[in-house]
Image (cartoon, rainbow, N blue to C red):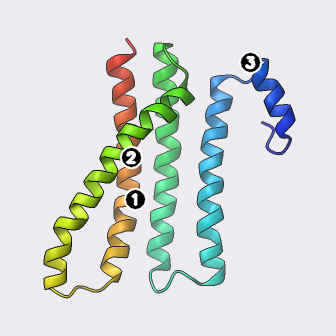
Amino acid sequence: MHIWHTDVIAKKLARDEIDQRQKTKYFIALFYLQVFGTVLPMFLLGLTFSISLFTFASYVTTLFIYHLGAVKVYRACAVHKKASVLDTLVVISLPICLKIQLGYWASFVLLNWPMQAMQVSVYSWVIYGFITLPIMVWLQFHLIKRAVDNNYV
C-alpha cells in the first residue's frame, strides 16, 4: 500500500494493478484516519467535556464495527463477483445512509418532546448521538451486505 505518493497510486490504478482487497484496505484506512484525525485531538486538547471515556468507547466501537463491516461486504462481493467492493460500498451507501439518517432524525424529533418536558440535560443528546453512531454504522454495513447477497446472485 502506498499512502503518500499519489502519482504512484494513480498509475497503478490506471494499469489496474490494485486489486479489490487492496482498495478495501485503502477505504478502511481512510476511515481510521478521519476518525483519529477528529477524535484524537479532542482528547489531547481536553475538549470532550465530562464524557470523554464514553465518547472514546463509542468511537472505538464504531471503528471496530466499520472495519468488520467493510470486510464482510468485501467477502460478499468476492463470492458473487458481480460488482467491485468499492463501487458497492460507495454507491449503495448513499441511499442506505439517507434512510438511516432520516430514521435517526425522526427518532430525535420524537424523543425531543418528552425529553424537553422532563428537562433532561443537554448531555443526554450527546450520549444519544454516541450510542446511535455505532448502531448506525453497523446497520449501514448490514444493509449493504444484505443488498449484495439478495441482488448479486
Q: Which mark is residue 16?
A: 3
Please name the amino acid that badge 1 sits on.
Answer: Leu
Secondary-structure class at tag 1: helix
Q: Work out whether residue 50 or residue 10 is closer to the camera in this orientation and state it.
A: 10
User: In the rendered image, which quarter contains the C terminus?
Assistant: top left
The local crowd at label 1, few if under 14, some if 14 to 19, many if 20 or more residues have their Cα within 10 Å, is: some
Q: Quick check: 96 left or right of 12?
A: left
Amino acid type, residue under disc 3 in the picture: Asp
Q: Quadrant of the N terminus?
A: top right
> Dividing the picture into quarters, in which one does residue 107 lie?
bottom left
Element carrying mark 2: helix
Percent x, y of residue 118: 15, 85
Crowding around mark 2 (Cα neighbors within 10 Å: few <14, some 14 to 19, many 20+) is: some
The answer to whether 150 is drawn above or below residue 118 in the figure is: above
Residue 55 picture location, percent across and down:
47, 71
Which label was assigned to residue 133?
A: 1
Separation of disc 2 and disc 3 at Cα?
Answer: 31 Å
Q: CA distance from mark 1 to mark 3?
A: 35 Å
Tell us which disc is closer to us: 2 or 3: 3
List x then y, in percent, for residue 38: 61, 66
The amino acid type, in three-letter code, at marker 2 is Trp
In this rendering, which labeled residue sits more in front, label 1 or label 3? 3
Q: Which residue in the structure is indicated by mark 2?
A: 138
Q: Secondary structure at mark 3?
A: loop
